[in-house]
């Protein structure tokens, strides 16, 4: 399973889903670019989330549609906003540096093997390193013994206080690691011509801040009434100590966040509602139920603003046999609105006309990584099948597939190409379709399988006589003939369910 991640990364590059940012310069750690197919897949997921949240929000527990509006706020806000939200003081990861290798590690991801008898040096390992590297080092340290025997002689511990006696994960000498230090993960910049502390500003580490800052503007300018939601999709930036696992943990990424404002007494009802809605969302995109896991985040691991969070975890191959976070559903209380009211001095309380009371509503926040969602969809779709030339196909739900169909003339003869071009012109305004003329048909099918195109329409010599094309199903490879004038309806039915 873990090896599958390498194959997935290779396919993403080969077929134009995802590239390392600045690839020709050797890349830049934690940054990724989306290629022609990746951007289509990402837009499909983004548009579907926006549709299900803002255009046609779910039906609430009382049987009527709930109310959600959207915003698109600035990435850079007044820096006081991040003081108020707790990010300047508290958005830290502990890290240790190695003076010799110049590498940096998440302190909470370093584990240390200490000899059981307390004699001799201890050895540090970086949990974020490739499994093979860890194995290789263990083997070296075991000096001919089996790794198991070696590990039995050592005591597995989290970072010990005395760093002077530890050999760092990438060195041969002891005492090269620094003590753990807190490292703020917000990227900063300077606004205007002078680079002074007075002009320091931050790139947002989560998109939701722009929602809280606009809470009063939205209430005053639209007809929303509690309970209601504000949704936003956009970029977020975190200077992660160890970006990892392809696009899973990157330094620039996209989030899709909903802040659902409700009365405190209704929190349990809405919390359950959102866990159910968000689960159904992933299932409707073709994610198998067995690939999801729900983690009630232990109190000690909760973010500073949350009193309860359920993480929706996905079975990413690198986490095998476990799961890792795809989305978090948090009860944020009225922490953020309270903090922003206090720090800004502005009165942002909600006024309930009927009850004649003013208050700061509580918030349930389903927060999803858009780019992490893209990775989950690719992992879920990746299907090994040795019986087909490509050896693998992407089993995307048709609504998520970057290309909905390919139109393939059997040969480059005008009698095949012309009807294919006509069909392409008829479809392209409604569907993202490919017209692929050259190469033998088997190779063209293989390419479409590898990029996850659910249907291929082949124009052959009979098309001129029976006005039909052969449609090939990506998953079953079964072929059937359908009339040319039914192709549009066929695609509508398969992609949107009618
Ligand atoms: N506003 C709440 C919040 O930001 P979070 O758990 O830190 O909560 C929410 O992030 C989601 O954003 C995560 O579940 C994940 O999908 C995505 N995310 C967070 N950090 C990420 C990173 N470094 N790279 C990619 N996605 C990330």
Image (cartoon, helix red, strand yellow):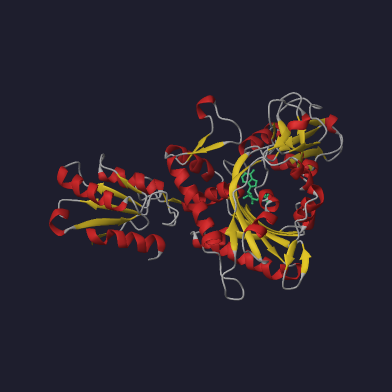
Number of numbered discs visible in the structure rendering: 0
Q: In which quarter of the image is the C terminus?
A: bottom left
Q: Which of 218 and 325 is in front in this view?
A: 218
* Relative to 164, 408 lies left or right: left
Q: In this view, does 196 lie above or below 2?
A: above
Residue at image coords 74%, 33%: 200
- Can you say whether 285 is above or below 199 in the image? below
Foreground: 106 or 165? 106
- Residue 345 relative to residue 75: left or right: right
Say left or right for 128 vs 59.
Answer: right
Residue depicted at 49% across the width and 42% down the height? 7
Q: Position of residue 9 (x, y in %)?
A: 50, 40
Furthest residue in direction bottom, as rendered? 62
Quarter of image, res 139: top right
Question: Is 189 or 343 nearer to us in this picture?
Answer: 343
Image coordinates for residue 453, horizontal then vertical, percent: 37, 51
Residue 259 visible? The answer is: no
The answer to whether residue 347 shows anywhere in this view is yes
Residue in the picture at 81% in, 38% down: 114
Extreme-left residue of the structure: 465
Say left or right for 14 vs 319.
left
Residue 68, percent from left and from top: 59, 62
Horizontal and vertical percent position of residue 57 = 55, 64
């Amino acid at each position: 399973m873990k090896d599958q991640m390498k194959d997935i990364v290779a396919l993403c590059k080969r077929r134009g889903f995802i590239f390392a940012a600045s690839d020709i310069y050797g890349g830049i750690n934690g940054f990724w670019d989306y290629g022609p197919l990746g951007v289509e897949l990402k837009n499909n997921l983004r548009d579907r989330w926006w549709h299900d949240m803002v255009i046609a929000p779910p039906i609430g527990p009382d049987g009527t549609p709930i109310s959600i509006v959207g915003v698109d706020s600035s990435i850079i806000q007044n820096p006081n906003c991040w003081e108020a939200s707790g990010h300047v003081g508290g958005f830290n990861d502990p890290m240790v540096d190695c003076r010799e290798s110049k590498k940096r590690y998440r302190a909470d991801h370093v584990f240390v093997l200490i000899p059981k008898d307390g004699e001799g040096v201890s050895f540090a390992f970086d949990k974020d390193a490739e499994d093979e590297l860890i194995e290789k080092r263990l083997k070296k340290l075991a000096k001919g013994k089996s790794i198991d025997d070696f590990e039995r002689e050592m005591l597995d511990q989290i970072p010990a206080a005395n760093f002077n006696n530890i050999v760092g994960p990438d060195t041969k000498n002891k005492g090269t690691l620094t003590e753990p230090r807190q490292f703020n993960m917000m990227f900063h910049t300077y606004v205007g011509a002078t680079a002074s502390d007075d002009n320091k500003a931050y790139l947002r580490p989560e998109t939701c801040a722009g929602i809280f800052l606009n809470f009063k503007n939205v209430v005053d300018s639209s007809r929303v009434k509690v309970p209601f939601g504000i949704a936003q999709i956009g970029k977020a930036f975190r200077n992660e100590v160890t970006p990892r696992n392809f696009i899973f943990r990157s330094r620039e990424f996209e989030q899709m966040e909903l802040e659902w404002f409700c009365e405190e007494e209704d929190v349990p009802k809405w919390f359950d509602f959102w866990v159910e809605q968000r689960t159904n969302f992933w299932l409707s995109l073709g994610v198998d139920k067995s690939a999801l896991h729900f983690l009630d985040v232990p109190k000690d691991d909760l973010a500073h603003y949350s009193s309860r969070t359920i993480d929706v975890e996905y079975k990413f191959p690198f986490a095998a046999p476990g799961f890792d976070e795809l989305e978090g559903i948090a009860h944020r209380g009225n922490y953020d609105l309270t903090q922003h009211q206090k720090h800004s001095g502005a009165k942002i309380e909600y006024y309930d006309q009927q009850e004649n009371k003013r208050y700061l509503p509580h918030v349930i926040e389903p927060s999803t990584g858009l780019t992490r969602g893209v990775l989950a969809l690719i992992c879920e779709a990746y299907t090994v099948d040795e019986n087909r030339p490509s050896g693998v196909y992407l089993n995307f739900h048709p609504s998520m597939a970057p290309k909905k169909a390919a139109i393939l003339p059997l040969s480059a003869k005008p009698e095949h190409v012309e009807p294919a071009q006509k069909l392409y012109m008829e479809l392209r305004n409604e569907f993202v379709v490919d017209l692929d003329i050259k190469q033998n048909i088997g190779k063209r099918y293989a390419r479409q399988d590898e990029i996850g195109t659910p249907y291929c329409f082949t124009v052959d010599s009979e098309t001129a006589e029976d006005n039909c094309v052969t449609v090939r199903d990506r998953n079953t490879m079964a072929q059937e003939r359908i009339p040319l004038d039914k192709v549009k309806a066929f695609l509508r039915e398969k992609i949107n369910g009618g």
